[in-house]
Amino acid sequence: MSYIWPLDATVPISVVGGIVRDFGSSPNDGINPAGGHTGDDYAAVIGTPVRAPGDGVIAFEGWVEGEYWQNPWWLDGKGGIVCVLDCGDNEPTFIMGHLSRTVVDKGQWVKKGDIIAYTGNTTTIPGGVGPHLHFEALPPGYILNGPTYGRVDPARYCAGYWADAAPDQTTTSSAFVFGIDVSMHQASIDISATGTRWVAIKATEGIGYADTALDSNLASARAAGVPVYFYHFARPTADNDATIEADCFVRNVQPRYQPGDGIVLDWEAENQDDTAWAKTWLDAASARLGLDAWIYMNTSTATTHDWAAVQAKYPLWQADYGPNTEHGFGTARTRPDAPGWNVAAWQYSSVGRLPGYAGDLDLNIIYRTENNMAITEADAKAIAHQLLIKEAWTGGPQVSLVLKALYEGFYVGGDSTVDGESLMTTLGKILTKSADPAAIAAAMPTALAQQVAAELGKRLQGEAA
């Protein structure tokens, strides 16, 4: 992916006391670390639009609280209002500070060139730089120790400006679970090109109907290597028995299912008040396939009828578009309220546009960590293998990935002896800004990795039961 600078080309680099405030300037001056200034300062007047340097997910926005080691980027309160854009596991992360405000929410997927914030002067030194944008870049797999705390010159990645470059390939971060849903209407989609992390595919409708693009869409999803959620479009009429519809769905899904997939009941046709019908279908399909299930519906339906029996067992995939746009939920990505529901996912746009398909797409986010959604077998294997074995601790860059995973709450458990907060505290005592990678590796006991791996094992066993 190519990246752009977040401000217009006419905005100059700040100059203070004759010193240009670019990356690496003023080392060891009592403010900057040994390697010098950790980013570029741009002398922008307050309220100048700040654009996303690339496609990615907003990993953080707002005032930074707590100690620097309590977040994956080693941010402290000196940055004022900050916005962090994570462009993917193999792509850079960008940090923008001293903002007056942001117009995005954590977890929001944005495209290159989208306005994500406005410049400001929050928490800057009186009589110092003055209003400006502080812009930093972290390379993929960054290690936070070293003379610039892992930061590199943004010019390594940013070569153009919004006026010069059009958006290109979409990427997403593994810390956020962005997905799409498709049916026969998207039969020609190239799922690999979209950057999606999961896909919901229509399998069946009513009694006896299988979606004509089920196999082609499934093949595209398997080629992309992403989990699949098979969904059934319910037709709860007087002539259609819920159990028979569930059996029809099971017959079509069972030979196509792979570990890590899921199932969903799409509830948007007739008799939406017949919540007992929905529960019968969910009970039958989940029991026959041995899988947990979701139910999909809009906010109005989810908050109008008596869903108590369904709510007690099945999470909601909520459809609510707000100011429906091709990039997402406008400038406010706060999910609309759905009292009583455990919300598994939110469909926030029905007119989304992504590479790999020329028409409208439904854009979604899974709230896995926020709503205690189950981690998949693939998640557990990837985390345990890449992050938690002894070799990973000595590899250096993986430490940043551990911090990201902890920050997103992968390891927060009920009555377990290991949770994200305690591990962050332990790491915080080890990961000082003066420590070098070798010191970090030496201080990381194998027992810590074993504890977390055991935690993952307990959770997987609990889900299987």
Image: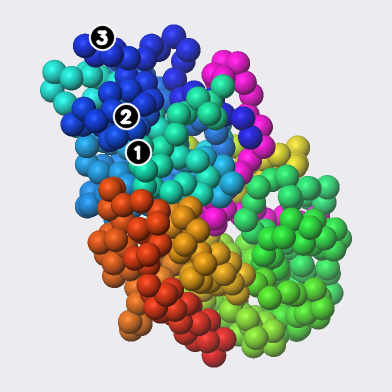
Q: Quadrant of residue 419?
A: bottom left
First in sequence: mark 2 or mark 1?
A: 2
User: In this orientation, which residue lies closer to the viewer: 408 or 36?
Assistant: 36
The amino acid sitting under disc 2 is Gly
Q: CA distance from mark 3 to mark 2?
A: 16 Å
Asked if the magenta segment contains residue 226, the reply would be no
Read off the residue under disc 1.
147
Q: Residues within 10 Å of mark 3 (few under 14, many from 20)?
A: few
Q: Residues within 10 Å of mark 2 (few under 14, many from 20)?
A: some
User: In this orientation, which residue lies closer to the viewer: 313 or 169?
Assistant: 169
The amino acid sitting under disc 1 is Pro
Residue 164 is left or right of residue 212, and the answer is left
Residue 346 is left or right of residue 258, and the answer is left
**Whole-percent x, y for residue 318 in the image:** 52, 59
**Whole-percent x, y for residue 235 in the image:** 71, 70
Read off the residue under disc 3.
18
Q: Residue placed at 77% from the left, 62% from the top?
A: 222
**Which residues make up the magenta segment?**
160-184
Q: CA distance from mark 3 to mark 1?
A: 23 Å
Q: What mark, if any, has residue 115 been given in the picture?
A: none
Q: Residue placed at 46% from the left, 55% from the top?
A: 396
Q: CA distance from mark 2 to mark 1?
A: 7 Å
Q: Quadrant of residue 162?
A: top right
Q: Residue placed at 37% from the left, 43% from the top?
A: 146
Visible residue check, residue 50: yes
The amino acid sitting under disc 3 is Gly
| Label 1: element kind | loop
Q: Residue placed at 29% from the left, 61% from the top?
A: 430
Read off the residue under disc 2.
36
